Image (cartoon, rainbow, N blue to C red):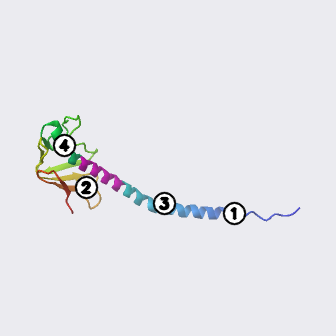
Amino acid sequence: MAIRPALAGFTLLEMLLVLFVIGLMAGLIGPRFGARVEHIERQSRMKEIEDQLRQLPRRARLSGRSIVLPKDMREELADGEPALQLPEGWSIHFEPPLLVAAIGACSASRVTLIPPEPDEGDSQAGRYNIAELTCEIKPIAE
């Protein structure tokens, strides 16, 4: 009877070492990845609110009435939707109040979007100027 040599393979110690290194890398990278995902979600919500602001002149023309923000923010327009729908926990500030006339023209206003939990060193998620008459929305560079 011939003796067979041991089959080549990994030892338990080698496997544990590889699993430890993989776990260590995941522990270091995971939190940074989670923070990046939250940042992307925040940017997405900001874009949704910007889009709602861009649609206000059209919605005012369709409803045939002026919209004053923040006063009319929750009031339903002709399409059955409120003027602005903010994600839960978000707030918005207009200085001075924004008037969107029934013909689709806007008054000049400065808009500040405030998320529920601002990033460190970033107390405000977004600031915009809304141009008079054209309703053009321009981000304010910080």
Q: What secondary structure is marked by label 1?
A: loop
Going from N to C along the chain, the mark reached first, 2 or 4, is 4
Question: Do labels 1 and 3 touch, CB within 8 Å?
Answer: no
Dot 4 surroundings within 10 Å: few (below 14), some, or many (20 or more)?
Answer: some
Q: Which amino acid type is shown beneath numbered disc 3?
A: Ala
Find out whether residue 61 is within the magenta segment. Answer: no
Residue pointed to by mark 2: 125
Q: Where, by quadrant of the figure, is residue 82 drawn? A: top left
Image position of 129 (left or right of 18): left
The residue pinned by badge 3 equals 26
Residue drawn at (28%, 45%) of the image:
87
In the image, taking residue 67 as reference, residue 21 lies left or right, namely right
Where is the N terminus found, in terms of image quarters? bottom right
- Amino acid identity at mark 2: Ala
Q: CA distance from mark 3 to mark 4?
A: 48 Å
Quadrant location of the C terminus? bottom left
Q: Magenta residues?
A: 38-51
Q: Is residue 5 left or right of residue 75?
A: right
Single out the mark in the foreground, 3 or 2: 2
Residue type at mark 1? Gly
Label 2 CA crowd tier, 10 Å (few <14, some 14–19, many 20+): some
Q: Earlier in the sequence, mark 4 or mark 1?
A: 1
Query: Furthest-right residue in view?
Result: 1
Type of secondary structure dominating the magenta stretch: helix
Residue type at mark 4 is Arg
Figure check: 16 above or below 73: below
In three-dimensional space, the C-alpha distance between marks 1 and 3, rounded to whole angstroms, equals 26 Å
Q: Kindly state the secondary structure of the residue where label 3 is placed.
A: helix
- Element at label 2: loop
Position of residue 50 relative to residue 8, above or below, is above
